[in-house]
């Protein structure tokens, strides 16, 4: 009986989260300015992560030279 209760709670939470995310995505794509802001944030995160990866690679290249 406990296992059934846990399944029901998890199932309800998953449905709640999916509906909530769907509402947020619908709001973002119905408003062009919010869509543009979302694309800007995603692109900024991508560029930031790419630059961090490049810096780490450069550090690794120079570490071999110093030894």
Image (cartoon, rainbow, N blue to C red):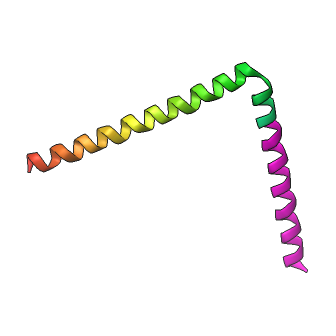
Residue 47: image location, x then y, percent: 45, 32
Above or below for 40 versus 13: above
- Front-lying residue, 16 or 38: 38
Above or below for 34 versus 19: above
Name the residue: 37% across, 34% down.
51
- Residue at the top extreme of this rendering: 33
Above or below for 42 versus 12: above
Dominant SS type (magenta): helix
- In magenta segment, residue 23: yes
Q: Quadrant of residue 61?
A: top left
- Front-lying residue, 52 or 5: 52
Count of picture labels: 0
- Residue at the bottom extreme of this rendering: 1
- In magenta segment, residue 3: yes
Residue 42: image location, x then y, percent: 57, 33
- Front-lying residue, 16 or 6: 16
Residue 55: image location, x then y, percent: 30, 38
Above or below for 49 versus 10: above
Quarter of the picture holding the N terminus: bottom right
| Left or right: where 50 falls relative to 16 | left
Q: Quadrant of residue 32?
A: top right
Q: What are the residue bounds of the magenta stretch?
A: 1-24
Name the residue: 80% across, 30% down.
27
| Left or right: where 20 falls relative to 37 | right
Name the residue: 44% across, 38% down.
49
Q: Quadrant of residue 35?
A: top right
| Left or right: where 33 falls relative to 60 | right
| Left or right: where 19 falls relative to 48 | right
Name the residue: 84% across, 70% down.
7
Residue 38: image location, x then y, percent: 64, 29
């Amino acid at each position: 009986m406990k296992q059934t209760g846990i399944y029901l709670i998890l199932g309800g939470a998953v449905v709640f989260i999916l509906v909530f995310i769907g509402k947020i995505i619908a709001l973002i794509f119905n408003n062009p300015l919010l869509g543009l802001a979302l694309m800007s944030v995603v692109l900024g995160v991508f560029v930031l992560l790419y630059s961090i990866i490049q810096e780490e690679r450069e550090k690794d290249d120079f570490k071999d030279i110093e030894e």
